[in-house]
Each structure stands twice: as structure tokens, then as C-alpha cells.
Image: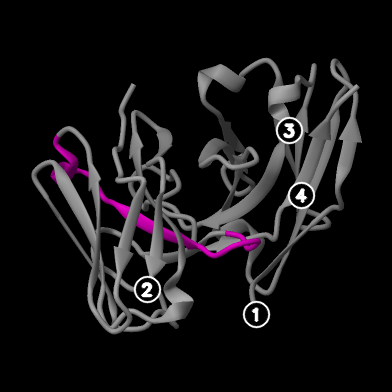
Amino acid sequence: QVQLVQSGPEVREPGASVKVSCTASGYTFSNFVINWVRQAPGHGLEWMGWISTSQDTVDSPQRFQGRVTITADTSTNTVHLEVRNLRSDDTAIYYCARAPTSTISGRPIYFDFWGRGTLVTVSS
Amino acid sequence: SYELTQPISVSVALGQTASISCGGKRLGTKNVHWYQQTPGQAPRLVIYRDFHRPSGIPERFSGSNSRDTATLNISRAEAGDDGDYYCQVWDTNTGIFGGGTKLTVL
């Protein structure tokens, strides 16, 4: 069965960096893309970006560009999300989510399987 | 930037039908997806591309999308349907979520 196993909780001080991982199993890794979505305490969902290992493509909204990096290790079917220069409002649960892609654009369509989430706490 | 508007909360009596709306400019021209999030859990896809149900999602869940509003309907509401529901679309290659609706089954 499809599984997305995420790394454990992290605590960082403001200004530091954090790297969260998501290891996929139960399907052909290159046939889907992996997205990152975060949820601050008591708030809604916020999309952070996606990566395609088959097309060597990464995309994220402009508000995160320069501070967020998404990478993939195809040898271990693992995707990493790194967030730099952390602020208190980066405190959130970070979810990875699999997505099938459009045959026309190669871009994600919907998020069909989700990891359980990784809590990142930013506090001095 | 594109915005999706959902009611903050919806209540439904046990066994009745709940309707959760999602509003956006010309939303009917986009594919809308819906996610359920029960307390302490990760979101789960319940409707994709407006009205399609993933494997394992009960037929009680249905969706529609027209003009400026998409709707998620949950018939014969059960206590386990309690939770937050989010609509989602793509706009200019950016993933957009609605603010979420808290469904309470009375």
C-alpha cells in the first residue's frame, strides 16, 4: 500500500534552518510528484511547492522562493524540504502529499495520499 | 491572487445532508478537489476533479461545480464525518486552498 513516512518533530531557534524528509513506498516513485503543504496551529492548509523526479522539475510559490528548497533522492525514494532563516510564524505541521500529474502539463492535479506530518517548532 | 471562500462552520443533524460551499471567481472553469481533516489527522482526499470519489470514499460524499461555486454534499451524515473540509484548486500554477469549513454533526 502507498505510504509516505515523514521524519520526526524538530525544534529550532529563529534564524536557523530545518530539513524535513518524506520517504515513499508502495508505488513507482517516478510516476507521481511530491508536494509540501503546511498547517500552522489552528490555521488552514498552505501549499509550499512540489518536485518531480521523472522530469527533474521543482516549483514553489514566489513567497517561498529563496528560503525554501525541495530536493529528491531517487536512490531512497525520499524527498526533502529545507526551510532557512526560520521565523516564529514558520511553526507548523509540514505534510508531504503525493499527486498524480496532468498528461498535458506534467503538473500536479490533486493530493491523493498524505504523510502524517512533521511538527516544526520555531522558538527562542 | 486567486481566493477561495468557504463558510467557517456548518452544522448538520445526524442522518441529514450537509452542504459545504466553496466560492471563487469563475470557479466552474477550474477543477475543484476536496479534503477532509479529522482532529489530529492528516488531510484525506474525498472528492477530486469536481465530483469524482477516490477508492474507499463512501457514495455519501458527492461534489458539484458550476459558475462561481463548488459544493461538497455529505448525505446521511455520521458522527465520524465531523472535522474540517478544505476545497483546493490550481491557479497560475499555484496550489490554492480555501480557508476550511468546520463540520459539526449534531
Which is nearer the N-term, disc 4 or disc 3?
3
Q: Quick check: do tags 3 and 1 share a chain?
A: yes
Please tell me whether residue B36 belongs to the stretch shown in magenta: yes
Q: CA distance from mark 4 to mark 3?
A: 11 Å
Extent of the magenta region: B26-42
Q: Chain of mark 4?
A: A
* Rendered-image quadrant of the C terminus of chain A: top right
Please give the residue where the numbered disc 3 appears in the rendered image: A91
Q: Quadrant of residue B64?
A: bottom left
Q: Looking at this rendering, what residue extends furthest in the left direction?
A: B67
Q: Amino acid at mark 1?
A: Gln
Task: Respond whether the residues carrying marks 1 and 4 are from the same subunit.
Answer: yes
Residue B30: within the magenta?
A: yes
Q: For the residue marked with disc 4, what is the amino acid?
A: Thr
Residue A73, position as x, y percentages in the image: 79, 47
* Mark-to-mark CA distance, 3 and 2: 33 Å
Q: Which residue is mark 4?
A: A118
Please state which amino acid type lies under the numbered disc 3.
Answer: Thr
Chain letter of disc 2 in the image: B
Mark 1 or 4, nearer chain start: 1
Q: Give the spatial CA distance, label 3 vs label 1.
A: 31 Å
Residue tagged by mark 2?
Answer: B106
Q: Secondary structure at mark 1?
A: loop
Rendered residue at 70%/38% (across/down): A92
* Of marks 3 and 2, the one in the foreground: 2
Of circles 4 and 3, the one toward us is 3
Residue that carries the numbered disc 1 in the rendered image: A1
Which is more foreground, mark 4 or mark 2?
2
